[in-house]
Each structure stands twice: as structure tokens, then as C-alpha cells.
Amino acid sequence: MNAMTQDNLRSAFGGESMAHMRYRIWGETAKKEGFPTVGRLFMCTSDAEQVHATLHFKAMKDIKGDFSVTSGAGFGLTSTSENLQGAINGETFEFTQMYPAYIAVAEMQKEDSAVRAMKYAIEAEKVHAKLFTKAKEAVDAGKDLEAKVVLLCPVCGYISLTGEEDNCPLCNAKKELFKSY
């Protein structure tokens, strides 16, 4: 695997790993503040970020050794509204700046497994940002997020709040595989 794609995958792995833990912490905050469905959304998205980190890790299956991993990450434990804004900012950065650049490099270097992993992530991050925006609007109105269900596609990290899909719209995985929160 080309060195630049390796560096990008490691950075993406680090960012997704940190988002995984940050969203778990923010989910607990949401529950404590009386927003249990927002808390479930954070927990579900946390696991979606783990899906992305795992895809990136597996794309580097032939890479061995110790590496410094540098990636940007939001920090701070504030109100649920502010945490949601942090999540929106992070997800938006990933799908507007980080992943488009990383995908362009991986495509140029013909690193198909890296491209596949990052394309799943970029499309899922768009959905995550929309759902966090919807949750923030509810929280800012003093309400919890209204959702029939909170479901995760364990293949690509897509999240549904309706459960109306027969298959994942991003990767076509069967709905029966989805994990409920």
C-alpha cells in the first residue's frame, strides 16, 4: 500500500476511534440531561464510528508495526446541545474535507480496499450529520429526539430512525442485520 494512503487511513482510523469514545461519553451526558433518545443516537453513532475504524484497520491488513497516529478531534464535555454541535462539526468536516481528499489520493494510487472503506464512511457521515442536526433542533426546543427506532447497519455505519428500509441504502445489507438501540 502506498505511504500516503497508509497515512490517511491511520489518520481516519484515529479520528473514528476518538469519535467512537467521544460519542459514548456525550451519550451518557444526554441521558443524564433527560434526552434518552439523543443518548441512544450518540451510542448508535459511536458504534458506527467503530465500524468505520474497523474498515480502515482491515484495509491496512498487510501493514505491521508501530505508528504515530495524528488526527483532529473535538474535545470538551458540555451541554447536550453543545455536544451535538461538536458532533455536527466533526461529521461535516469528515464528509466535506477529510474523506474527499483521502479518497482522491487512494483512487489515484489504485488502493481499492481503502477507497471502499472511505466511501462507506463518507456516505454514513452525511447521514450522521443530518441526524445530529435533527437532534440538536429538538434539544434546543427543550425536547428529546422523536424516533420510532434507532438502528445501525453494522456493515457500513448507516443509521435509520424509521426502520422503513428493506436493505441498507448505502451498502445493501439486509435489514435483519441492523442493530437496535
Image: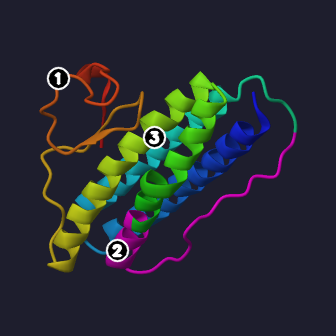
The residue that disc 2 covers is 80
> Which residue is rendered at x = 66% and y = 58% of the image?
71
Which image quadrant is residue 141 in?
bottom left
What segment carries the magenta color? Answer: 66-88
Vertical position of residue 116 compared to residue 9: above or below: above
Q: Front-most of 71 and 161?
A: 71
Residue 75 inside the magenta-drawn segment: yes
Q: Which residue is mark 1?
A: 166
Task: Name the kind of residue labelled 2 in the image.
Answer: Thr
- Is the residue under label 1 in contact with that under label 2 (CB below 8 Å)? no
Question: 47 and 6: which one is in front?
Answer: 6
Please name whichever residue, 78 or 170, is drawn nearer the observer in this view of the structure: 170
Residue that carries the numbered disc 3 in the rendered image: 121
Nearer mark to the viewer, of 3 and 2: 3
Query: Dot 3 surroundings within 10 Å: few (below 14), some, or many (20 or more)?
Result: many
The residue that appears at 48% across and 46% down in the rendered structure is: 49
* Residue kind at label 3, given as amino acid type: Ala
Q: Main secondary structure of the magenta part?
A: loop
Residue type, label 1 = Asp
Residue 123 is at least partly visible in this image: yes
Q: Within 10 Å of the Cα at label 2, are there few (<14), some (14-19), or many (20+) other Cα atoms?
A: many
Going 54% across and 69% down the picture, which residue do you hit?
A: 74
Q: Residues within 10 Å of mark 1 (few under 14, many from 20)?
A: few
Q: Quadrant of the N terminus?
A: top right
Query: Residue 21, located in which quarter of the rendered image?
Result: bottom right
